[in-house]
Image (tube, grey):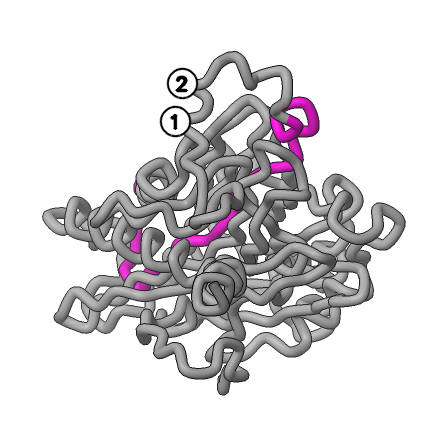
Amino acid sequence: MTQPDRHPGLTLPDRGQITDVPGVTVGHYTDLEYATGCTAVLVDEPAVGGVDIRGTSTGTRETQLLDPLARIEHIHGIMLSGGSTFGLEAATGAVRYLEEQGRGLKIGRMTIPLVPSAIIFDLDLASHLVRPNADNGYAAAEVASKGTATGTVGAGAGATVGKLHGKQLSIKSGLGTASVRLGDDIVVGALVVMNAIGSVVDPDTGTVVAGPRTNDGFENTLDVLVDDPPRMRDLMGLRNSSNTVIGVMATNVGMDKKAAIRFAAAGQDAIAMSVRPAHMAGDGDTVFALATGKHPKLSGEDAIAGIEDRLRAAAMRAMVSAIQSSIENSTGLAGVPSATEHLAEISAGATND
């Protein structure tokens, strides 16, 4: 999918996409007027699913299906949505679309699509009265395809980071994606909606790439919380915890549900590497996993024997890269600038001086 030139003159790296994983497609519904949306991650054939949830403020639907003790072995997609609890309705639209396509669990003459879901809180960016609904979820599923837009799109339309001091100093983030190829036709992909109270860093360099805005860049939220306790009473973000990072890991290698949960956990590890701090009390960080089993040789549930550590390492690298993508490709909305726009404003001010 061709991306608009959001930042003229800035060359962004080609990080790949989750849709590089065979059998995975992505579609978005985006409402820029009200800064919200939803994203459908679908599989063309049933896939083994897993989930890892951290933080204490989660908003999810049908995640119990992914418990290894649950009878269900396969799912048919994942819905990520804005709108807080109200946005969980978007998954109903994806279910309806998949049923019409004959994609789902077959029980007699019935087709029952299984689409677990997770949401972010974006109600405070533009309007708390407009949230993704079932029709919007249907629209996202209907346009799911190979290749996906990134940035201020879909479930990332209302996402922000660096919210420690409230909206007035936050940074517009969004949706990012990336993939890693291990050779032997093994592909690992990640998609993330970056909506964190904390700052985002490049874990390779330690550089803060997005966080509460300052006159010369960004603040490191972790440093403020640890080193500057007198300001705690002024930290709006902690009182109004509108956070949560949600995402999906995918691979074409087959695995069982226990391995899928460990695969999802690697995505959470990448969030912990990239967000300072992550998994806070106001977070409901949720990462799903999809194992399509589309690899020509490694399709069975025991296929990961001997390569699981490589897969988890690739998952961490893909999610780290997807998080960087969510910052690089976003554009400002509802009065909140992107990281690129904030740095450009600083540079322009320095030039004028």
Question: Considering the numbered disc 1 on the image, is that residue within a helix, a strand or a loop?
Answer: helix
Instruction: Identify the mark at residue 138; answer none if there is no mark.
Output: none
- In the rendered view, would you say 41 is above or below 148? above
Residue appearing at x 68%, y 62% in the figure: 333
Label 2 close to label 1 by CB (< 8 Å): yes
Left or right position of 235 against 327 = right
Check disc 1 and report the residue beneath it: 223
Between 62 and 353, the one lying in front of the other is: 353
Check disc 2 and report the residue beneath it: 226
Residue appearing at x 57%, y 32% in the figure: 164
- In the rendered view, would you say 282 is above or below 127? above
Quadrant in the picture for residue 59: top right
Is there any visible trace of residue 72 in the rendered image? no
Q: Amino acid at mark 2?
A: Val
Q: Amino acid at mark 1?
A: Asp
* Number of residues whose C-alpha sits closer than 10 Å to that of mark 2, classed few (under 14), some (14–19) or many (20 or more): few
Residue 11 percent coordinates (x, y): 35, 78
